[in-house]
Image (cartoon, helix red, strand yellow):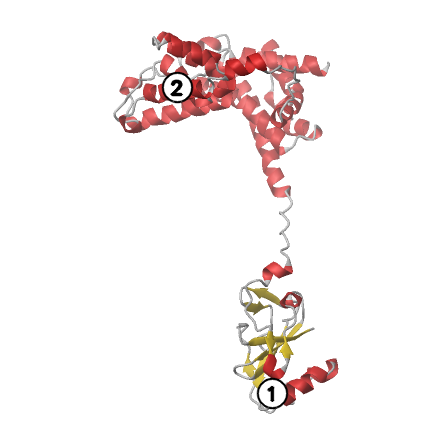
């Protein structure tokens, strides 16, 4: 079977399957609905038309409504001449609902505003915006273009090719419904063998969802006359077998979608530039009195040790990274340090001690604070405008 034949086969079967019932919104009996139910039905209608049609598809409905309500012929002709893409889906949906019996005004809906008034205003805006459409068409040379399928179109086409065996199963039901065994078809294995992704599974599930809902409504005994008429040649046992099959399709697609969520790799955390991380850190760049200059604060990120000197309190301190961690910066504070090892001491003669600090090597710095005769004070992580960043290691 060729791809073209297979696609046509699916489309034809779907058309036959869905021809049993008109799914467009029905406003029969709306007089007895309360405000909440009417609002719910209106929203469902808007969702239906948005999902099933484009603004271009529904433009004829707007024209039909204008003609049926004796709207000014000049305005109607002007609207017809505008480009099809100027007519929005909502306009077409409103016109379709009005044609099918939706009332123009209800005091318990949309604060009693007129739906017709909204539609007329929208039509006039389209006519005004498209008043030069005819002139543009006369002047501009129209070049033939090839309609490129959208990503959604491609996705749907690939997904539909994965349903050949599902359609064959439905065909076998139509041929011999009494011997149809829904358990004989392993839909999950079938879709996995075709490497169906979550997006394909969602498309396939939604494609067959309406058939399942119709059959469940039929089996519940609450179906309308139109639906019962469409399946009157099927026994209850046959209907239940077909429901079981559609449920198998639904559950298989749902499982593939859930598996995709579990297997999805966590999003990699975006690494911020070090300069951006330390942008809010407040520190003293230079201290002329003791000829001190701070190191680049970006060097603190990922380091194991940071020496600081507070020019106001005369405290010399050392931040030591906690075990298995590195020093970092958050706002105006140092993070990742050991609260036990990170201490500071007050210098009696800061000029002499800091001169000695500058000339000290790695080994000497290990015991540098121990040799200062002063009380240990724990560091709190905060850095301020009086703090010089002496050294990073």
Q: Is residue 131 left or right of residue 141?
A: left
Image position, residue 311 (x, y; %): 55, 81
Image position, residue 158 (x, y; %): 66, 24
Image position, residue 139 (x, y; %): 58, 14
Q: Which residue is mark 1?
A: 350
Q: Quadrant of residue 120?
A: top left
The local crowd at label 1, few if under 14, some if 14 to 19, many if 20 or more residues have their Cα within 10 Å, is some
120 in relation to 299, above or below: above
What is the number of the mark on residue 124?
2
380 in relation to 225, above or below: below
Q: Quadrant of the C terminus?
A: bottom right
Mark pair 1, 2: CA separation? 82 Å
Q: Quadrant of the N terminus?
A: top right
Q: Is residue 2 left or right of residue 306?
A: right
Q: Quadrant of residue 6?
A: top right
Please name which of the two marks, 1 or 2, marks the residue nearer to the observer. 2
Residue 225 appears anywhere in the view: no
In the orientation shown, which residue stands out farthest toward the left? Answer: 107
Q: Residue at x 43, y 20 (%)?
A: 128
Q: Residue at x 37, y 20 (%)?
A: 119
| Callout 1: SS | helix
Residue 286 appears anywhere in the view: yes
Q: Residue at x 37, y 24 (%)?
A: 42
153 in relation to 361, above or below: above
Q: Are marks 1 and 2 in contact (CB under 8 Å)?
A: no
The local crowd at label 2, few if under 14, some if 14 to 19, many if 20 or more residues have their Cα within 10 Å, is some
Q: Quadrant of residue 198?
A: top right
| Callout 2: SS | helix
201 in relation to 5, above or below: below
Q: Residue at x 51, y 11 (%)?
A: 19
Tell me how many marks there are.
Answer: 2
Image position, residue 270 (x, y; %): 63, 52
């Amino acid at each position: 079977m060729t791809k073209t034949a297979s696609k046509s086969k699916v489309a034809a079967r779907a058309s036959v399957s869905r021809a049993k019932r008109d799914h467009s919104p029905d406003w029969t009996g709306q007089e007895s609905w309360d405000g909440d139910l009417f609002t719910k039905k209106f929203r469902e209608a808007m969702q239906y038309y948005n999902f099933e049609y484009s603004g271009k598809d529904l433009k004829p409905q707007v024209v039909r409504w204008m003609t049926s309500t004796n709207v000014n012929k000049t305005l109607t002709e002007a609207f017809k001449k505008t480009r099809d893409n100027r007519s929005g889906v909502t306009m077409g949906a409103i016109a379709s609902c009005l044609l099918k019996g939706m009332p123009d005004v209800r005091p318990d809906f949309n604060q009693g505003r007129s739906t017709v008034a909204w539609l007329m205003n929208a039509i006039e805006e389209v006519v005004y915006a498209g008043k030069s459409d005819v002139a543009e068409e006369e002047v501009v040379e129209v070049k033939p273009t090839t309609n490129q399928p959208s990503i959604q179109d491609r996705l749907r086409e690939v997904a539909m090719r994965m349903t050949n065996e599902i359609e064959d199963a439905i065909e076998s039901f139509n041929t011999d419904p009494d011997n149809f065994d829904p358990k004989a078809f392993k839909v999950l294995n079938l879709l996995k063998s075709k490497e169906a992704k979550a997006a394909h599974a969602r498309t396939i599930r939604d494609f067959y969802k309406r058939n399942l809902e119709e059959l469940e409504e039929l089996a519940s005994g609450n179906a309308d006359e139109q639906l019962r008429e469409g399946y009157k040649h099927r026994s209850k046992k046959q209907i239940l077998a077909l429901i079981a099959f559609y449920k198998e399709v639904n559950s298989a697609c749902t499982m593939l979608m859930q598996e995709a969520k579990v297997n999805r790799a966590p999003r990699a955390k975006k690494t911020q530039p070090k300069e951006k991380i330390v942008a809010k850190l407040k520190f003293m760049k230079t201290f002329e009195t003791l000829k001190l200059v701070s190191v680049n604060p970006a060097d603190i990120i990922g380091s194991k040790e940071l020496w600081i000197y507070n020019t106001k309190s005369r405290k010399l301190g050392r931040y030591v990274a906690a075990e298995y961690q590195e020093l970092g910066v958050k706002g105006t504070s140092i993070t990742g340090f050991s609260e036990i090892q990170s201490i500071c001491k007050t210098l009696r003669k800061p000029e002499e001690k800091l001169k000695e600090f500058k000339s000290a090597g790695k080994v000497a710095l290990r015991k540098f604070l121990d040799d200062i005769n002063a009380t240990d004070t724990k560091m709190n992580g905060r850095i301020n405008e009086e703090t010089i960043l002496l050294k990073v290691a």
